[in-house]
Amino acid sequence: MVNLPEESLIVVESLFKSFEDGEILKNINLNIKEGDLVSLIGPSGCGKSTFLRCLNCLELLDSGYIRIGKVELNRHPGQKPDEKMIATAHEMRSEVGMVFQSYNLFPHKTVLQNVMLAPVVVKKMNPDKAREIAMTQLEKVGLKEFAGKYPGTLSGGQSQRAAIARALAMNPMVMLYDEPTSALDPQLVGEVLQVMKALDAEGMTQIIVTHEMQFARDASDYIVFIDAGEIVEYDDGDILFTNPKKDRTREFLRHFNGMGMAVNC
Amino acid sequence: MKKIKKIILSVPLIILALVLCLAAAAPSSAAATMREGVLRWGGDSEGGFPYMFPNPANSDELIGFEVDIVNEIADYLGLEPEYVNNAWDNLIPGLSRGLYDIAINGLEVTPEHEEAVNFSIPYYKTFLQLAVRRDDDKGISEIDDCHGKEVGTLKESYAEMILEELGDVNIHTYIVEANTYEDLQNGRLDAALFDSPIAIYSAGFNPSIKFVGRPVGEITYAIALPKENRELLSDINRAIVSLRDSGKLREIYDRWNLWSPMMAELFNDYSPRAIEMTRYDEWAEAHRPQLSMTGRLKRYAGFLPAFGRAAVVTILVSVTAMAIAILLGLVLAITRVFAPRWLAAAATGFVEFMRGTPVLIQLFFIFYGLPNIGIMLSPFWAGAVGLGLNYAAYEAEIYRSGLFAIPRTQWEAALALGMTRWQAMREVMLPQAIKVVIPPITNDFISLLKDSSLVSIITMTDLTKAYGQLAAAYYDYFGPGIMVALIYLLIGLPFVKFSRFAENRLAEQDAGGKRGSDYNFYRSSTRWL
Ligand SMILES: Nc1ncnc2c1ncn2[C@@H]1O[C@H](COP(=O)(O)OP(=O)(O)OP(=O)(O)O)[C@@H](O)[C@H]1O
Ligand SMILES: [Mg+2]
C-alpha cells in the first residue's frame, strides 16, 4: 500500500473509470484534509458527478486506490470485483454522506422517518434514540416543525435541507454534494449554502460539486477544477479565480466573467 | 352418446394421449384404488336427461336411469356407491387417473374407447329417433324422406354422421336439444334426429311433435373400467347379468319409459310392462306446462342455495390461487432482477412458458398428467395451484414494471445511506412499488375470478358448473344465466371498488411529487454489486 500523509482524511490515487462510451476519469489523484471544504468545478460532462459517485462507490472504480478514514479500497486494472471488495464498498458508503441534486427523499415516508430510517435499519439503532438524533439534525437544518410532513409538501430548499439532515444522521466522516442547489429557485439557494457553511464551521469535511462560483470562492478551502476527466488545477479559491495557472481553467472561468467574477486574465 | 361435442374436445384427447404415453413409460399407478366397501363411480351431472341430471324438484339430488342402475349394481355387490362428478369428455381420462372405479354416462362401446378402457357387457341399447311436426306437411315418414329437407340434430353426434351419410340433407346442428325441437315446432326445421332417450325426454310429451319411422342405427352403452381391474370387471358383469335376469333392470327401464323392442331383443324379455313409468311422468309433468312468471321466480329462488355453495367454491379457489400468485410472483420478480444470471434466466423462462401456454392445458396437465409421476393433487389444489402458477407469471411482470417505475435515484439514495441491497429493496423500493402495482394486481384478481370458471373441468362444482347443471336440468339457460352473471359481478365488485380507490390514492401521491431521474434503478451499475 502506498504510504500517504497521515493528516489526509481522504486519499485518492490513480483513479480510473470508464463507461461503454469512453474513459470518464483519467488518473485522478487527490488528498483532502479533515475539516476541509472542497469545491469541484468544471464543464458539464467532465466527470464531476462520476468522481463523487466513485467516492461512495455508487460506481465502482475501474482501478486505483481510495481511502476514506480507515476504509481502503484498492483495485488493480482488470481485477474482478469480489465479495471482499463489495463489502468494502458497502463499508465506505456508510462512512460517506451523499446529497443529490434532486434531493431523492423517500416520498412514502415523513421527513422524520426519512432521517431516522438509515440509523434504525443500517445501524440497528433503537428507534427512540434514532428519533432523538433525527430531531437534533432537523433542528440543525431548521426543519424541526416539518418533521411530520411528507416530502411532497416541502419546497426545494426545505427538501434539500432535509436530505442533508438525513445524511448527517448517519454521522458520516465526509459529506458529498452533487450540485445541491442547481434545482433550486435562486431565492432558496442561500438557505442550503448556509447549512453547508455552518457544517464547515463545525469541522465537517465536505466535497461539493457546484456551479455557485461565488460560494465556491468564499467558502472553500480548496477548489478543484476538473476538465475532460482530469484534475487540471487544484488551489485556494482566491488564487484559482484571480490567477489561474492553466489556460483551460482560464477558458472555463471566462464564462462566469459576466456574472461578476473577477478573473485576472 | 349424444355429444361427442363440447367446446374443448381436442384438449382431453391430447391429455389422454399424454397420459397413455407416460403410463407406458412409467409403471402405472392407476390400478383401481377401490376403497374398502365403496364403489366410486364417475359421471357428468350435466350428462343430460334421462341418463343423469339434477332432480328438477331438488337440484341437489342427482337422478336418472343410470343412477338407478349404479345403485342396483352397488347394492348387489354389497358396496356403498359414491358419486364423483367429472366432465363427460374427461370421464375416460379420469378412470386412468384413478378418480373412480367405474365410469358410466352413456359411454359408447367404440374401438377407440376400447383401447383405453375395458367395457362391461352392455346395459342398454338404443337407436336414433326421427321426429316431425304433428301437422307435418313435408311427407316425412322415414329417414330416407329427409332428402332435401331441413333436419336438426346435435353437433358432432352419431346422428349427424348418419345424416351426412344420407347426403343431400340440409343439416342444422345444435348444442342444446331443446332449441332443436323448438325450431322444429316453429317450422324452421322439417325433422329432428336424436338418440331415442333424448327424443323421448325432449319431445315425447310435446303435443305438436310426433315420432315417425323405424329405428335408425344402433347405439350400445356399457360401463367403463380401468384396464388393470379385471376382478372388478367380472363382478360388474356378474351384477348386470343377475339384475337383468331378476328383472331389476327391466323395472328401471319401465319406470323411465325406456323399454323398447330393441331392449326386448337384447334382454330376450318380451313380457308386457309390469310397472308404471313414474319417473317419466314426473319429468313430463314438470316440463309440459309453461311455467307462470311467479312460478319461474320461485324456481329461481330455489337455485340460490346451490349457487351460494358454488360461489363459495369460486371464491375459495380464486383467493387461494391469488395468494399463490402474489407471493410466487414476488419471488419470481426479485429473482429475475437480482439473482445470478442463470437463475434469473430460469425465472424468465418460467414466466414466458406460463404466459405462452393456455391455462386450460396447464390445469389438465396438473390434474391428469402429474399423477403419472406420483404427484396427485385434489381438484381444489390442482385448480388453485394451476391458476396460481399461471397468474404468478403475470404478477411477476407487474411487480417488475412496478419496481422499474420507481426512479433509480431512490435506490441510490438508499444505498448511499449505507443500506444493503436487500434493505434498500425492503425499505425503499418495495413499499413504493407496491403502491404502483396494487391497481393492476387488483384488476388481475378480477380476471382470475372469471378464469376460475375453468376449474369446472377438473370436477369442481364452481359457479360456472352450477350454472351448467341447473340450466341443463331445467332446459333454461336464460334465468340461471342472468343469476350467475350477477353473482360473478357481485363477487368482483369490492375488488373493482378497491382498484379505483387505490388508483386515486396513487394519483394524489404523484401530485405530491416523486422527483428524480427518468432512469430506473435497473440501469444502475449497483444492481449487481
Ligand atoms: N452510468 C453511466 N453510464 C454511461 N455513461 C455515463 C454514466 N454516468 C455518466 N456517464 C457519462 O460520463 C460522462 C461524465 O458524466 P458526469 O455525470 O460525471 O459529468 P458531470 O461532470 O457531473 O456533468 P454535469 O455538470 O452535467 O453534471 C458523461 O459523458 C456521461 O454521459
Ligand atoms: Mg453531474
Image: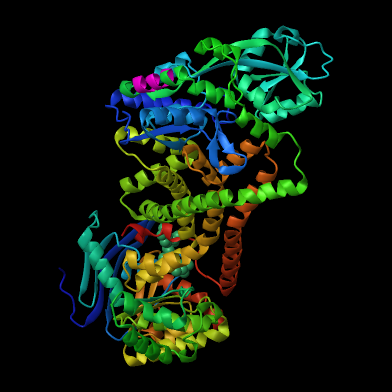
Q: Nearer the viewer, residue B444 or A1?
A: B444
Q: Is residue A242 visible?
A: no
Instruction: Identify whether B164 is placed above or below B381.
Output: above
Instruction: Identify whether A74 is placed above or below B155.
Output: below
Figure coloring = rainbow
Q: Is residue B497 left or right of residue B293?
A: left
Quarter location, residue A45: bottom left
Q: Where residue A189 sits: x, y (%)?
A: 52, 84
Q: Is residue A16 magenta?
A: no
Q: Where residue B195 sits: x, y (%)?
A: 62, 20
Quarter of the render that holds ligand 1: bottom left
Q: Nearer the viewer, residue A186 or B345?
A: B345
Would you say the magenta stretch is mainly helix, strand or loop? helix
Q: Nearer the viewer, residue B446 or B468?
A: B468
Q: Is residue B238 magenta?
A: yes
Q: Is residue A166 visible?
A: yes
Q: Is residue B271 left or right of residue B12?
A: right
Q: Nearer the viewer, residue A46 or B233?
A: B233
Span shown in magenta: B233-241
Q: Which quadrant would the N terminus of chain A be assigned to in this image?
A: bottom left
Instruction: Identify whether A187 is placed above or below A108.
Output: below
Q: Where residue B206 sits: x, y (%)?
A: 74, 27
Q: Where residue B504 sits: x, y (%)?
A: 61, 67
